[in-house]
Image (spheres, rainbow, N blue to C red):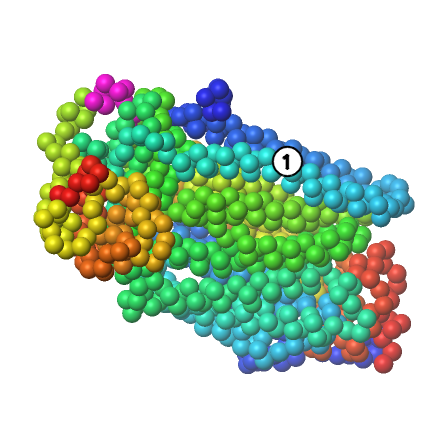
Amino acid sequence: MTAEAKALPSKSYLEDGYTLSSWFFSTDHKRIAILYFVSITLFFFVGGAAATLIRLELLSPTGLFLSNDAYNRLFTIHGVVMVWFFLIPSIPNTFGNFLIPIMIGAKDLAFPKLNLASWWIFVLAGCFVIAALLIGGVDTGWTFYAPFSTMFSNGYVVPAVIGVFIAGFSTILTGLNFIVTIHKLRAPGMTWFRLPLFVWAIYATSLVMVLATPVLATTLMLIFAERVLGLGFFDPKLGGDPVLYQHLFWFYSHPAVYIMVLPAMAVMSELMSAFCKRRVFGYKVVAYSSLAIAGLGFLVWGHHMFVAGESVYAGLVFSLLSFSIAVPSAIKVFNWTATMRKGYVSLDAPMLFALGFIGLFVIGGLSGLFVAATGLDVHLTRTYFVIAHFHFIMVGGTVSCYFGALHFWWPKMTGRMYPEMLGRGTALMIFFGFILTFMPQFILGWLGMPRRYHLYPPEFQVLNVLSSAGASILAVAYTLPLIYLGWSLFYGKRAGANPWGAAGLEWLIPSPPPRENFETVPVVTWEAYPYPLKPQPVERKETP
Amino acid sequence: MGAILPTPPIGLTPLSAYAAEYDWLFFGMCLLSLCFMVPIAVAIVYFAVKYHKDSKADRSERISRRSRLILESSWAGIPFLLTLGVFVWAGKMYVEWATPPKGALEIAVIGKQWMWKFQHPGGQREINTLHVPVGRPVKLVMTSQDVIHSLFLPALRIKMDVIPGRYTHLWFTATKTGTFRLECAEYCGTDHSRMGGSLIVMTSADYQSWLAHAGTAISLAAAGAEVYRKNGCSGCHGANSTVHAPTLGGLFGTMVRTADGREVLADEGYIRDCITLPDKNRVAGFPPIMPDFSGTISEADLIKLIAYIRSLPPGARP
C-alpha cells in the first residue's frame, strides 16, 4: 500500500488549501469535523471555566466571592454550554463527521453543503448563547423550568433560548445527513451487518436527534411566546400548566441523554476491538441494543417527574420502563468486557480511556437505577445524588470516550502520534480525578444537599472540599491534552496508515486521509473486525 | 414493614418508620450494585493480565453458539430480575408516600420566593419553621404563590413539589422529637439556597402548649367565613339567594358530576379550581354564572375559604 501511495501522491485533506475560506467554506466532511472540533473545544473550556468557578465557590458553605445571582448564572451557563454546545455535538459532529463516510467506504456525507450549513448554524447558535452570557447571563438552570423562566427570571432567557433553538437545527441536519449517508452511500459489499458498531450506534443517535429535537424547538418557542408575548402555556396565572412544560422538556431531554451517551458507546466498540484485537463479542446484540436504547429512550421521560405531580400510576410505569432501558446498556458493558477474553490486550491510552469508561459508566448506570426506583427517587431527586449520577454518565462516560476517541483517531486525523505516556497519564488522572470529584456528591445527595445550592449547611463542607479537590485534578487532566496534542501536531512521530494495527476501512487509507478518502471505491468482502488481520484485504480488491 | 426494621447504623438518622425502611432499601440497592460492579472489575483486571498481548495464554477455544446464547441471555436477564425486586419495593414505598392516612393533622403550606408559610388548623401561622407533634400523622397541603418549589424533609426521606395553581400533598409520622432541616429542593431563583428552615418535632403536650402560645383568636375555618362574607359568596350560594348555585355544605369529599359528564372528587384542588377556573369543572345542572376569582383572592385566603367550606355541615347554605 505504501509503495502504491508513493507512486500516486495524493494531497491529504489538510493540504487541500491553506486559506481561511478553504476551511470555513469547505464541504469536506473531514474539514467540517475539524471545524466542529475546534468550536466545541472552545465551548468545553467555557463550560469548564464555569465548573471551576462553581467548585471554587463551594469550598465554603457561605460562598467565597459570588453573589447568589452570579452563582445561579454560572451553573446555568455551565449546563447550557456543556449540554448543547459540547456533549450533544461532541462525538457525532467531530468523529462521526470524520469517520462515518470513511467507515462505510464513501467519499463524503450524502449532503456535504448541508453539513457545512449545520456547522454555520451551530456557530450562529453559539453566538446567541455567548451574547446572553456577556450581556448578563441567564439564571434559570439549563432546564428552563416554567413559570420561573417565562414570568419570573430576570436573566437573559430569550437570547439563550433562541441560541438553543437554533443549535437544534444543526443537530437535526447532522442527524438527517448521517441517516441518509448510512442508508445510501455504503460501499459495495458493506452490508448492514458488516458495518462497524460505531456506525450502528451513530445511526441510532441520529434517529433520536431527528425525532426528539423538534420537540425541544417547540417547547422553547412556547417559552418565548409566554415570556415575550404573554401567551399562557405554563403559568397558571395565564391559564397554563407548569407541569406540562416538564413533560415537553423531558420528552426531548431524556432522549437527549442518549444522544450524548450512544456515541460514547459507538466509540467503545471500536476501542475495545482495536485494543483487544478481537471482534466485539456478540456483534449483533450490541448493534441491536443501540436501537433498543434509542427506542426505549423515548418512553422514560416521566422518571424526571416522580415528585412533580404526575400520577402514582404514571410514575410506576415510567419507573418500570426505566429499569428496562438498563438492560441493553448492561448487555453492552458485558459484551465489551467479554471482548477482552482470548484477545491480545494492549493498554495504550485509548484503551485506558475505554476501561475508564466502563468503570464510570457502570457506576453511573447503577446509580441510575436508584433514581429510576420511584420510592428511592423521592428522597434522592433534586439533590446532588442526581448531579453525581448524570455526571458519571455524561462526563465520566461520554467525555472519557471522547478523549479515548481523540487519542485513538488523532494519528488518522493529523498524521502524527501523540506522546503515549502523557496520554496514559491523562487517562488515569481523568479516571481518579473524576471519582474524587463525584463520589462525595453521591453522599452529599443522600444526606440531603439539594442541587443548585449556593449556600449549604456547614456539615457538608468536608465532602464539598473533597469534590473540589477532585475537580482541580480534572481541570489539569482536561487541559493537558490541549498542550501535548498541540505539540504533537508539529513534533509528533509520523503515524503511518495504521499505527494501531486496527481493522476498519479508515485504517486502510493514508493518515491524514486524502481529500477523496478512497482513490477507488473499496469493495468489502469481509465481516467487521476481521481479527487477526490478514495482510490488507483491500489491496487485492482495489483494482478499478 | 418499616416498623419491624431497626435503624440502619450509619448516615442521617431516620425520623420515621418510612425513613428507616427507606434506608434499608437504599443500602440493599447499594449492596446489589456492588454485586454487579465487582465481577465486572475483576473480569477486566483478570482479562487484561491473562490476555495481555505479550502473554502466551491459550486463545484457541471457541464458544459454541448455544452457550453464547445462554451466556448473553443470563447476563441480561438475571440482573434485570434482581433489580425488579428493587422496583417493587420502591414502588410500594412510593404508593405509601403518595397516600396520606385519613384523619391526619392538616397543615397548609404556601411557598413563595423565598420563604415557606405554614398555617395550622387553629389559624396559627409561622414562617420557615414548622412545628409538628410526634407520633401523629401530619399532612401538608401545599401550593405556591409564584414559581415551582419543592418541600424537602431529608430526615424523613421525603419531598414533594409545590406547584402554583394546584395543591399537592406530603405526609409523614415523625417518631422522634428534635429539630431537623427543611429545604426547598426545586430551583426557584436568587435565594433558592436560603429558602429553608427547620422542622421541629415536639411531644404532643409541647405542641399543644406551642399552639396555645402561638394561637391566634381565630381558626382557619372561621377566618374563611370572613373571606366568604367579604367576597359576597352567599349572594349566590346562600339559602336566601334566588340564583341557582350549588349547595356548599357537605360538598367536601363527595363525588361531583360535571356538566360535561365527568365524576370529580371534591377535594381542595377541586374547590380551588371552582373559584379560580369556574369553567373547568362546572357542576351538571347549573348555569355557567360563577365569576372567575383568579387574581382577586390570595393563596392564603383560598386556603381559608376551603377550610371554611370543608367545615360546613351537610345541607348548610350560609
Residue A381 percent location from the top left of the image: 44, 42
Q: Is residue B62 visible?
A: yes
Q: Amino acid at mark 1?
A: Leu
Identify the residue position indicated by label 1 in the image.
Answer: B82
Q: Residue at x 69, y 70 (%)?
A: A182
Q: Quadrant of residue A173?
A: bottom right
Residue A431 percent location from the top left of the image: 59, 44
Which contiguous range is marked in magenta?
A: B200-208
Residue A319 percent location from the top left of the image: 53, 45
Above or below, A28 against B59 in this view is: below
Asked whether B123 or A177 is in front, the reply is B123
Residue B75 percent location from the top left of the image: 71, 41
The N terminus of chain A is located in which quarter? bottom right
The chain identifier of the residue carrying mark 1 reads: B
Q: Residue at x 15, y 28 (%)?
A: B214
Is residue B207 covered in magenta? Answer: yes
Is residue A283 covered in magenta? Answer: no
Taking the image as shown, residue A359 lies to the left or right of residue A347, namely left
Q: Residue at x 43, y 25 (%)?
A: B17
The C terminus of chain A is located in which quarter? bottom right
Q: Residue at x 13, y 37 (%)?
A: B222
Taking the image as shown, residue A382 lies to the left or right of residue B163, namely right
Dot 1 crowding, Cα within 10 Å, few <14, some 14–19, many 20+: few
